[in-house]
Image (spheres, rainbow, N blue to C red):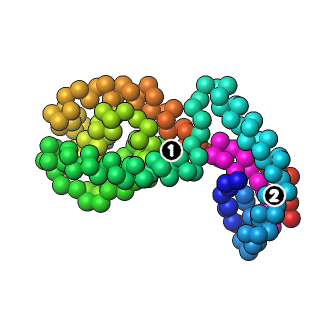
């Protein structure tokens, strides 16, 4: 079973099962072996909570939360795909750029620093190609216009005349995709020493 350990000054172990999976909160110095023992002792409870969580999501019509492995796969393909798209579009926009970083954020699709370093969300890999291109061009146009002024928009339209479809796609489906990377909520076990 996959779980994430978060250590803090607490004195007991707590297990949280939420949309993000299993999180174990543990005292700073407790050994991994002791933590594993606590997790093992609560295995049935954890599995029940995970089943409940997936049921809740499917009843709500939500696509299932992404597992850590799925996110890692998205990261890997993003590291391949995005630099290619950036290299393709940068000359069309007429700009250079710095480093390209792939993150897995819950809020933003991409960003562009004043030095030209670009950052993209690995969840873009779950969107259509024209949406990926739209976000890439959006960030590259920030190399010229660091804002969302009509000038930024005009630059984008020169390179991607049919960017409206991507805008609409993001409006209609963007949040659903971002929410597959979920915040931790849900039940906790009784505390354990
Ligand atoms: Zn922007």
Residue at 86% x, 65% y is 193
Quarter of the image for residue 168 reads: top left
Q: Is residue 187 magenta?
A: no
Residue at 77% x, 63% y is 36
**Disc 1 residue crowd, few under 14, some 14–19, many 20+, Cα 10 Å:** some
**Disc 2 residue crowd, few under 14, some 14–19, many 20+, Cα 10 Å:** few
Residue at 51% x, 32% y is 176
Q: Is residue 36 visible?
A: yes
Quarter of the image for residue 40 reads: bottom right
Nearer-the-camera pick, 7 or 36: 36
Disc 2 on helix, strand or loop? helix
Q: Which residue is mark 2?
A: 40
Disc 1 on helix, strand or loop? loop
Nearer-the-camera pick, 71 or 118: 71
Q: Is residue 30 left or right of residue 176?
A: right
- Residues at marks 2 and 1, CA–CA distance in whole angstroms: 30 Å
Residue 27 x/y as whole percent: 75, 68
Q: Is residue 145 visible?
A: no
Q: Is residue 12 magenta?
A: yes
Residue 72 x/y as whole percent: 50, 52
Q: Which residues are magenta?
A: 10-22
Residue 6 x/y as whole percent: 67, 61
């Amino acid at each position: 079973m996959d779980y994430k350990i978060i250590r803090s000054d607490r004195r007991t172990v707590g297990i949280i099962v939420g949309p993000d999976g299993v999180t174990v909160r543990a005292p700073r110095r407790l050994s991994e072996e002791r933590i594993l023992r606590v997790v093992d002792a609560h295995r049935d409870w954890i599995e029940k909570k995970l089943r409940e969580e997936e049921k809740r999501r499917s009843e709500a019509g939500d696509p299932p939360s992404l597992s850590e492995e799925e996110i890692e796969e998205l990261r890997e393909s993003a590291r391949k795909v995005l630099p290619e798209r950036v290299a393709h579009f940068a000359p069309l926009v007429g700009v250079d750029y710095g480093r390209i970083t792939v993150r897995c954020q819950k809020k933003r699709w991409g960003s562009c620093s004043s030095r030209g370093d670009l950052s993209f969300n690995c969840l873009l890999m779950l969107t259509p190609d024209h949406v990926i291109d739209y976000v890439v061009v959006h960030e590259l146009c920030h190399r010229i216009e660091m804002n969302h002024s009509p000038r930024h928009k005009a630059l984008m339209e020169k390179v991607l005349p049919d960017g409206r479809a991507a805008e609409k796609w993001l409006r209609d489906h963007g949040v659903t995709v971002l929410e597959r990377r979920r915040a931790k909520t849900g039940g906790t076990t009784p505390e354990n020493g």
